[in-house]
Image (cartoon, rainbow, N blue to C red):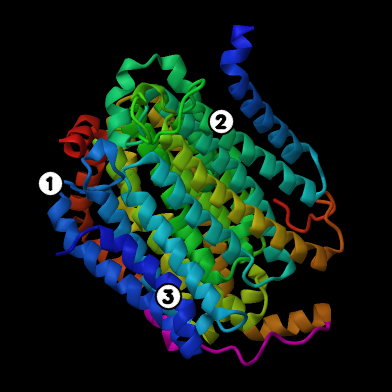
Amino acid sequence: MSFLNDYIYYIGAFGLIFVGLYIILVKRNLIKVIIGLGILDTGVNLFLISVGYITEGTAPIFSRPGIDAERMVDPVPQALVLTAIVIGVAVLALALSLAIRLYQHYGTLNLRRIREQKW
Amino acid sequence: MVTPVLLIAVPLGLALAIPLFALFWKGAAKYIPPVALAFNLAVSLLLLPRVLDDPLIVSIGGWRPPFCINLVAGPVGVLFSAIIALVGLLVSIYALDYIKEGATEKYHTLYLLLLTGATGVVLTGDVFNLFVFFEILCISSYALVAYLRDKAGIESAVKYLIQGAVGSSLLLIGIGLLYGQFGTLNMADIAGQIGSASPMSLFVPMILMITGLGVEAAIFPLNAWLPDAHSSAPSSISAILSGIAIEVGLYAVARVVFTIFGASSIFLLLAFVGIVTLLVGEMCAFSQNNIKRMLAYSSIGQIGLILFALAIATSYGVAGGLFQLVSHTLAKALLFLAAGYMIYQTGSSQISALEGMGKKMPLTCLAFTIGAFSLVGLPPFVGFPSKFLIVRAALATGETVFAVLIGLALLGTVIEAAYFFRVIQVLYFKRENELTETHEAAFGGPKPNPGSKEAPVAALIPMFVLVALIVVVGIYPKLVTDALNSAAGELLDRLGYIRSVLG
């Protein structure tokens, strides 16, 4: 069980990433694809956080005496994730607004039927 | 004091100030990008001679490099930022007259943000910062592809967004894996420690990063979005996407492969991928009837050629690749700008609709022809020395593989010449009278728009500045070769890079 304890966050993160990729590749409805992008983003963010996580670590702030720097979680991935979340929100918002426009033009969100442009 | 920080700070600040200016005077919006980009061009050109020998390292926040986000203004970075500013400036002058419909101040804001992102990517020395600037570039280009809000634009933007977002996620996973192994995000610091890691543990992040960046660079299996996005965007944006955005993606791939990983074992693979990209792009371009799609596919082909040249990984090869990159940027921007007004005047982007345009828009067609000749690689223009350098580099390696591959690349050039000459023939050598008659006889439709006239001055100036650059650099390539050689040196010399950043 110690394997599961050590790697549970990584398993969860990559699980989410693969679920997201699966949805993006297989689903036909644009809204579902966008949800897939959201899940993919969440997986990546969880992965970044777990890179810097220490089991039972403390927040990286010297708030009271006796806190050991070795026991602190790494603050850098948290800063990265904050940025990545903001970027993810921007991309999702843009994707949803494009989905609205796409529906106005085609009357459908089924990506298999929206095929005006070909190679 | 001129510092590279200004190259990012000034256009970023002005881009976000555009909506404020537009509150007071709506017409002000379109004059801000030219001002910001002229400033950037001046700063880059001032910095360029200074950084040729010794890169300028700027540490943000006053911490020493491995602990801070740093900018590395080496020859590569400043050369790229100069090109971005130059082409950006010319296209923004073109857009003064070309962009009339829609929410123009949003167009100009996004345009300046796109170029800020591109400048940031080439100057940064931190992998996560690279990701952030890359996203600035990508998000603004998704929005700009959809700017016209027509069917084609929205559809292409959706495709581009989905593929681009997956690519960025892969890049971010790669960055996370690197951080997990080395505990640092500084490119030089990672590069310095990479020798101590096992090759297997580096393989996954490297492939993830190359794939993620390869989506934006439109390397062969990842380029499905490009022809749609580049052909549906407004022509000024197509020029920027084809001339700058994919080149910046390719720069990032080169930076990751050369500087961070120093992965000499995958160069041959990249050379093959480059040649496949080249042949696929040129063959698809040959079969297109839509002029902008043809130009977009031709960009894929050129990207393949540049990737091949970079993957030769000798100083000649990399310098040739960078030279080809410069010449492609100039020529493709010119072609899209010229095509933009031809399409505007004829109302159709089919190649057959351009018959006889050589008489109606002589200057625009002349510019288009020179751009096409340069891209094919005819002697007086800049495409010739750059392609020549690549051929020489490939043969100088003395390896049969590269000799065969360059032969295939030249085959690609022949295909390229075939489709460009076809367009030029349509422009000049079809007589309008007999054409109109056959047109009427065949379709009974209306004549081609009789009011076709020359493009406005605001569009002709940037086109002819590009023509002048293409001719002058083509005749006298020594103007740029110093900068290119020292840029190639920076990309190949990993230890020098690490030493100059970490001191």
Q: Which residue is mark 2?
A: A47
Disc 1 versus disc 3: nearer the observer: 3
| Quarter assignment of residue A94 | bottom right
> Whole-Å distance between the Cαs marked 2 and 3?
36 Å
| Quarter assignment of residue A97 | bottom right
Residue B205 or residue A83, whichever sits in front? A83
SS type, badge 1: loop
The boundaries of the magenta stretch are: B444-463
Q: Which residue is mark 3?
A: B17
Q: Which residue is mark 1?
A: B53
Residue B129 shows in the view = yes
Where in the figure is residue B383, as x and y percent of width and height?
A: 36, 56
In the image, is B58 to the left or to the right of A64? left
User: Mark 3 is on which residue type?
Assistant: Ala
* Residue at 77 percent of width and 87 percent of height: B446
User: Mark 1 is on which residue type?
Assistant: Asp
Where in the figure is residue B189, as x and y percent of width and height?
A: 28, 31
If the image is split into quadrants, where does the N terminus of chain A sit?
A: top right
Residue A92 or residue B311, whichever sits in front? A92
Are labels 1 and 3 on one chain? yes
Q: Residue furthest front?
A: A65
Whether residue B448 appears in magenta in the rendering, the answer is yes
SS type, badge 2: helix
Whether residue A9 appears in magenta in the rendering, the answer is no
